[in-house]
Image (cartoon, rainbow, N blue to C red):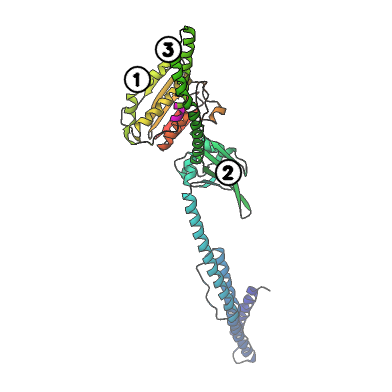
Amino acid sequence: MRISWIFSLLILLLAGAVVALILIDSGTLAYKLVWGVALLGVLLLVLFYRNVMRPLRTITNGIDLLRAQDFSSRLSHVGQREADRIVDMFNGMMASLKQERLKLREQNHFLDLLIDVSPMGIIMLDSNGKISECNKAAVKYVGFDSARDMLGMSVKQLDTPLGKVLYSLQDREVKVVRLNDSMVYRCSRLSFMESGISHPFYMIEKLTDEVMKAERKSYEKVIRMMAHEVNNSLAGIISVMETAETEVEDPDLSEAISACKDRCRDMGAFITKFASAVKIPEPVKRHVDLAELLKSRIPLFESICNATGTKLSVSLPDKETPVFIDPVLMEQVVTNIIKNAAESAGKGGKVDISIDSPGTRLVVADNGPGISPEAADMLFTPFFTTKESGHGLGLLLVSEVLNAHGCRFSLETYPDSQTRFTIKF
C-alpha cells in the first residue's frame, strides 16, 4: 500500500471520529471511545508526518534539485536519525557534484581558450552536420571574416578553395593541399564520441612556412651547385672564345664562335636569374598611395603588353588608396603578374588592371586560355612552369614577396573565362 494512501486513511479516520463526536451524546461510553479514537488518530498523524511524510518530502525535494541540476542548494535535517543520515549523504553528494561541475567548467573554459588561440584551425559539427563551433584560425584559413558567418552552415556551403577541400574529405582522411594562393595546409576529418553519439570535426594545420623553408633549402642547394659548376667554367670559356674570335679568319667559324660565346652569356644570365630568386631582400615598408604608384608605371605596363600584342585596360580610383608596402618590391611583383597575364592573353588578348573596394584589393585579369586543374595544383611550386622558355621562378618570387607583406592573394580562372590574380592588402 502506498504511503500516501495510509496518510489519507488516517485523515479519513480522524474526520470520521470528529463527525461521530458531533452526533453522539456526550457523557456516554461511545462518546468517550470515539474521543479516544480521535486523540489516537491525531497522535498517529503527527507521528506519521514526522517519521514518514516529512523525510519523504525532503527526499522528493532532493530529487527535484537533482533534476534541476541545482547543486548549490542543500536539504535540512528533519529531526529523525535515519532520515538525517540520508540528508547528510545527499548534501555531501551535492557538494561533490558541485565541485566536479565547477572543475569541469573550468577545464572546458581553459580548453576553449586554448582552441581559440590555437594556430591550428578547428571546426566542430553538430548531429545535423552543421558547423556548431570554429576558432579564429579556422575562420581565417577558410576565408571568412568572422565565426558568425560560418555557424549553422554545412561544410558543403563553404564556397572557398579550402572549404571545397574539407568537403571532399572522408572520415579519418588526412590530405595535404597547396591552394591557388600558395598556402599549404594539412586537413583532417576526425570524430569523437559523446553520450554514445559520434561528433565529426575538422582540423586545419598551416604548413606554408615549413614547406617554403624546405623548398627554399632545396632550390638554394640546387642553385649553389649549378652556380659553382657553371660559373667557374663560363668566365674562362668566354675569355678563350673572345681571343679565338679575333684570331680566326674564316667568317663562318668566327660566326660559330660568336654564337657559342652568346650561348655562354645566356647561360650565365640563366644562372643569375636563378640566384636572384633566393636573394629577395626584406621589404622596407612605408605608406604609399597604391593607385598613384600604378599610374606612374602605366607606360611600363603598356610596353610589356605591346610586346605581346595585348591590349591594356586600367581602372584606378581617383581617391587615395593607402597601403603599407615596399614600393620597389611591389612594383616588381605587379610587373611580373602583368607580364604573365600578357603572355597568357597573347596577341589580340586583353589585360585589365583595377583596384576594388571594400578594402584595398588589386586585381589583374586576362582573357587567356586559363589555368588547367593540373596546373592549378602546382602553382607557386619552385621550378614549375607551363611556358616553354620559363624557369618556374616568377610566381615563386611573387608569392614570397606577398607573403613577406602579409597579403592574401590568389590566382584562379573563373567561370566567366577570366583569369584573375587578386591581391588583398
Residue wearing tag 2? 188
Foreground residue among 226 and 280 = 226
Whether residue 356 sits left or right of residue 175 in the image: it is left
Residue wearing tag 3? 246
> Is residue 339 positioned above or below 25 on the image?
above
Give the amino acid at mark 1.
Pro
Q: CA distance from mark 3 to mark 1?
A: 41 Å
* Upstream in sequence: badge 2 or badge 1: 2
Q: CA distance from mark 3 to mark 2?
A: 67 Å
Residue wearing tag 1? 299
The magenta segment is 272-281
Q: Residue furthest front?
A: 247
**Quadrant of image for the N terminus:** bottom right
* Upstream in sequence: badge 3 or badge 2: 2
* Upstream in sequence: badge 3 or badge 1: 3
> Is residue 40 positioned above or below 145 on the image?
below
Identified at 43% across, 16% down, the residue is 243
Give the amino acid at mark 3.
Thr
Give the SS element for disc 2: strand
Q: Please say if the residues under marks 3 and 2 sit with CB atoms less than 8 Å apart.
A: no
In this rendering, which labeled residue sits more in front, label 3 or label 1?
3
Is residue 273 inside the magenta stretch?
A: yes
How far from the left and from the top, in percent, is residue 303? 38, 18
Which numbered marker is on residue 400?
none
Identified at 33% across, 28% down, the residue is 293
Q: Please say if the residues under marks 3 and 1 sit with CB atoms less than 8 Å apart.
A: no
Q: CA distance from mark 2 to mark 1?
A: 48 Å
How far from the left and from the top, in percent, is residue 179? 52, 34
How far from the left and from the top, in percent, is residue 249? 45, 7
